[in-house]
Image (spheres, rainbow, N blue to C red):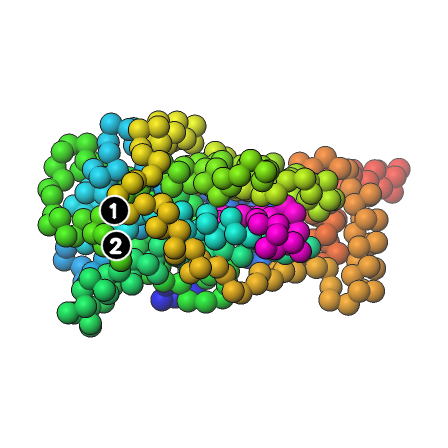
């Protein structure tokens, strides 16, 4: 991207009513209500988008590119050649009566010059991850290894479970690999136009991947140039393919050729990445390798706690997805997660597993070396009370003392998600005991009693 941003989840203050729904449901306690409005603590936010789903007033939004501006023919585009990178979860938004070819053709009708499905690179990513699961080749790697495909989970580990960073498989996410390969293929194909400006637009199911495109976890510049929400693209896409209005573009523009073929088919195991369990099934092909697929932040937290305790060493590979049902349950999708997952599974059943001619999954595995991540993930000390150990210990003792004096109702009326969070805020100097309505009421009643005593 051209602009570095750290978070894609933002607050519309005019729409916010200060109701604390987002505060009490945020899985990382990254939201507070102050002066009647919600406030996102940037150092804690992992861009999971849970607040976007939960807010009854739609005050939480994703900072994303405007697809209506993209489709405006009168608007000058920064790119001469625009490539769509549809996430696997996009296919789950449509019933199987609409083929993947129709969906891709619809994207072309909406203004894209080419379509490079992210699903097409998942085979290479799976192969790269599979190599790290080889105990003979990498005997010193800890178990279980954790998938790196969900940026929200990686951020969660960086903040809450930094001791598990070595468990993350060092593999680049499919979105980034797809953008790199798409641009390389386009430059090869359009070699006679060396000055052509090529842009890649990812069609995203979640806010986490938006942030990953703007501010990659590896600290490098992303090959993705823009991100659109699936729900925004879906509205325009369903009108096009549903009405049969999509006009066929030149066949050469339908898909960018790889080094082997001008066709980019998508196979069933690659589509499955859009739902929970799909990545694990695609990555692990041996019965000797054990896997566990988990979806939803609450369940992922419990599993990571078990990993930290050392009780899951018998598991080789963990697929952790922040959203329920996987990417099809993201905050930026168009239809509900169970239906999208059903659509995806039905589509998988009707899609070939591989091809015996042209491009095959075996040939795609040759791109696996390019998927290996050289950089390491670093901890984000958002929960650190103080850099000085003694000061931090003193603050922790003080925090526990304050917590014991609070009512323990975890009602959220103070603007913090629970009493323990309020105690922490008090110690940090950003809140006071009187923010608790129970304590405030007790003090008020005490003042009334004292006033009556003085009068008598």
Q: Which residue is mark 2?
A: 260
> Do labels 1 and 2 touch, CB within 8 Å?
yes
Q: Earlier in the sequence, mark 1 or mark 2?
A: 2
Q: Which residue is mark 1?
A: 358
Picture layout, residue 283 above or below residue 179: above
User: Would residue 233 be seen by someone viewing this image from the given angle?
Assistant: no
Q: Residue placed at 66% from the left, 36% from the top?
A: 411
Q: Residue placed at 51% from the left, 48% from the top?
A: 130
- Range shown magenta: 133-154
Gap between marks 1 and 2, in whole Å?
7 Å
Q: Position of residue 300 (x, y in %)?
A: 60, 40
User: Would residue 247 be seen by someone viewing this image from the given angle?
Assistant: yes
Q: Residues within 10 Å of mark 1 (few under 14, many from 20)?
A: few
Q: Quadrant of residue 333?
A: top left
Q: Position of residue 416 (x, y in %)?
A: 64, 45
Q: Main secondary structure of the magenta part?
A: loop
Task: Find residue 11 and name its label.
Answer: none
**Disc 2 secondary structure class:** loop
422 horizontally vs 36: left or right:
right
């Amino acid at each position: 991207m051209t602009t570095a941003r750290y978070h894609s989840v933002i607050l519309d203050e005019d729409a916010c009513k200060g109701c604390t729904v987002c505060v009490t449901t945020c899985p990382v306690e990254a939201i507070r209500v102050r002066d009647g409005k919600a406030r996102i603590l940037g150092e804690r936010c992992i861009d999971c988008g849970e607040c976007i789903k939960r807010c009854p007033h739609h005050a939480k939004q994703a900072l994303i590119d405007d697809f209506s501006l993209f489709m405006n023919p009168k608007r000058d585009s920064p790119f001469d050649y625009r490539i769509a990178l549809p996430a696997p979860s996009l296919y789950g938004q449509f019933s199987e009566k609409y083929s993947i070819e129709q969906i891709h053709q619809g994207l072309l009708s909406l203004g894209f010059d080419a379509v490079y499905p992210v699903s097409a690179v998942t085979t290479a990513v799976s192969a790269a991850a599979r190599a790290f699961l080889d105990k003979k080749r990498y005997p010193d790697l800890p178990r279980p290894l954790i998938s790196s495909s969900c940026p929200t989970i990686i951020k969660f580990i960086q903040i809450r479970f930094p001791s598990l960073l070595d468990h993350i498989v060092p593999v680049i996410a499919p979105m980034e690999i797809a953008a790199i390969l798409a641009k390389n293929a386009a430059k090869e194909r359009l070699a006679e136009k060396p000055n052509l400006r090529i842009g890649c637009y990812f069609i995203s199911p979640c806010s986490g991947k938006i942030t990953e495109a703007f501010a990659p976890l590896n600290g490098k510049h992303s090959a993705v140039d823009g991100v659109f929400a699936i729900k925004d693209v879906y509205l325009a896409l369903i009108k096009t393919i549903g009405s049969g209005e999509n006009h066929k573009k030149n066949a050469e523009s339908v898909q960018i050729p790889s080094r082997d073929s001008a066709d980019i088919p998508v196979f069933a195991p690659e589509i499955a990445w859009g739902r929970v369990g799909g990545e694990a099934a695609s990555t692990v092909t041996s019965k000797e390798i054990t896997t566990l697929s988990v979806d939803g932040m609450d369940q992922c937290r419990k599993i990571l706690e078990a990993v930290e305790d050392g009780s899951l060493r018998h598991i080789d590979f963990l697929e952790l997805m922040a959203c329920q049902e996987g990417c099809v349950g993201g905050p930026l999708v168009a239809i509900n997660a169970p239906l999208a997952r059903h659509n995806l599974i039905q589509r998988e059943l009707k899609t070939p597993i591989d091809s015996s001619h042209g491009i095959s999954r075996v040939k795609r595995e040759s791109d696996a070396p390019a998927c290996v991540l050289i950089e390491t993930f670093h901890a984000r000390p958002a929960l650190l009370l103080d850099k000085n150990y003694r000061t931090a210990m003193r603050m922790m003792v003080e925090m526990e003392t304050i917590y014991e004096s609070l009512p323990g109702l975890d009602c959220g009326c103070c603007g913090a998600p629970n009493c323990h969070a309020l105690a922490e805020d008090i110690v940090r100097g950003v809140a006071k005991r009187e923010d608790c309505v129970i304590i405030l009421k007790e003090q008020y009643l005490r003042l009334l009693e004292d006033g009556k005593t003085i009068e008598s």
